[in-house]
Image: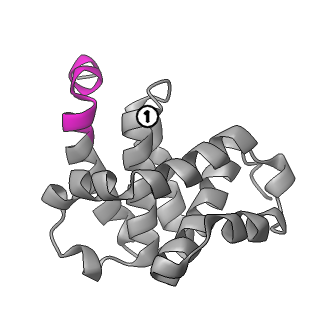
Amino acid sequence: MSIKKSARRRARELALQGLYGYFIAGDGAEIGLIEANLRDLEGYEKADQELLERLLHGVVQEHSALQADIEPYLDRPLKDLSPIEYSVLMIATYEFKNCLDVPYRVVINEAVEMTKEFGGTDGFKFVNGVLDKLAAVLRAVEVEGGR
């Protein structure tokens, strides 16, 4: 039995796939080519197109700032993160900062679920730990209000 994914979940997953390719390709990556490749993937037409575009372009444009936000909460150098963990953390950090209509717990849950589906065995635990700490800083009022 398959679970029906929401349009927003599909958008996040496609953004993850696109950013994975973008970060793997390095400096020569073209976001337009990556977007074209995403259009060929199953489920593309069911994704929240606005959110997908916002996440893809936002993470690429704010990449350095997002990286600086997560670095203090890592237990290893950035270069040692798996590309999936890195991409998930970039998406979630972008959402913490720019998608204030999405509750921080939803951001963390979505990131953990994507890491479980696409990442390594225990990667989701690492992602959850980093995002819990980051939420306390980037969404301090919301986190405190929820306790």
- The percent coordinates of residue 20 (x first, y second) are 53, 72
- The percent coordinates of residue 49 (x first, y second) are 74, 44
**Residue at (47, 64) in percent of width and height:** 115
From where the camera sits, is residue 6 visible? no
Give SS at disc 1: helix
**Residue at (80, 68) in percent of width and height:** 41
Name which quarter of the figure residue 76 lies in.
Answer: bottom left
Question: What secondary structure is the stretch in magenta mostly built from?
Answer: helix
- The percent coordinates of residue 7 (x first, y second) are 73, 42
- The percent coordinates of residue 139 (x first, y second) are 28, 30
Name the outermost residue toward the top: 145
Against 22, is 92 above or below?
above
**Residue at (48, 58) in percent of width and height:** 60
**Residue at (29, 64) in percent of width and height:** 126
From where the camera sits, is residue 76 visible? yes
Against 138, is 39 above or below?
below
Q: Tell me which segment is drawn in magenta.
A: 135-145
Lateral position of residue 2 relative to residue 34, left or right: right
Identify the amino acid type marked 1. Answer: Asn
Against 98, is 131 above or below?
below
Lateral position of residue 72 relative to residue 67, left or right: left
